[in-house]
Amino acid sequence: SGLVPNSHITKHNGPTNKKLRCFLPLVCKDNARLRVGSVENVPLKKGKVLIWDDSFEHESWNDDDSSRITLIFDVWHPETTVKERKFLSFLGNSQLRAQKKIVEMSGNKDNFFSIIDRAQYLEVAKEELWT
């Protein structure tokens, strides 16, 4: 995830507590911070991971003059059972399949699913990746 200089992602939260959000700053300076729940001004440090329950309200600031780049990924909340994880995975996959079908029926060829499909076959030279 990238956050441009002098910007703010407003408060938001995930719909359930099924996952923990893992937040690893890769490129950031001293003026990047988070608020998670009632904990204000959590400073972001390059290489230091932060983890919280995604259902907690959170927001992010980058008050610096350069972009912040963060690896964000989710893991199952440790209190979810195997049965709950299977059910929630089934629901998520069913929702994706239904959305894909709706998009296919609309005839729109430029959509999330077609972009992902086309990206599988892209051939990019190593030297072009970071230019």
Image (spheres, grey):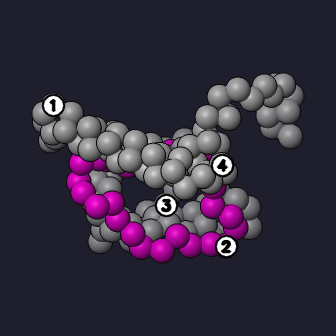
Q: Residue at x 57, y 63 (%)?
A: 32
Q: Earlier in the sequence, mark 3 or mark 4?
A: 3
Kindly identify the amino acid type of the residue bearing the numbered disc 2.
Answer: Asn
Q: Earlier in the sequence, mark 1 or mark 3?
A: 3
Q: Residue at x 50, y 66 (%)?
A: 60
Q: Is residue 67 magenta?
A: no
The Cα atoms of the two marked residues, 2 and 3, are separated by 15 Å
Which residue is labeled 2 in the image?
A: 6
Numbered badge on residue 109: 4
Kindly identify the amino acid type of the residue bearing the numbered disc 4.
Answer: Lys
50 or 96: which is nearer to us? Answer: 96
- Tell how many labels: 4
Numbered badge on residue 43: 3
Q: Is residue 129 visible to the viewer in this orientation of the structure?
A: yes
Q: Residue at x 44, y 68 (%)?
A: 59
Q: Earlier in the sequence, mark 2 or mark 3?
A: 2
Nearer the camera: disc 3 or disc 4: 4
What residue range appears in magenta?
Answer: 1-28
Q: Position of residue 46 (x, y in %)?
A: 58, 47
Element at label 2: loop
The Cα atoms of the two marked residues, 1 and 2, are separated by 42 Å
Which residue is labeled 1 in the image?
A: 82
Element at label 4: loop
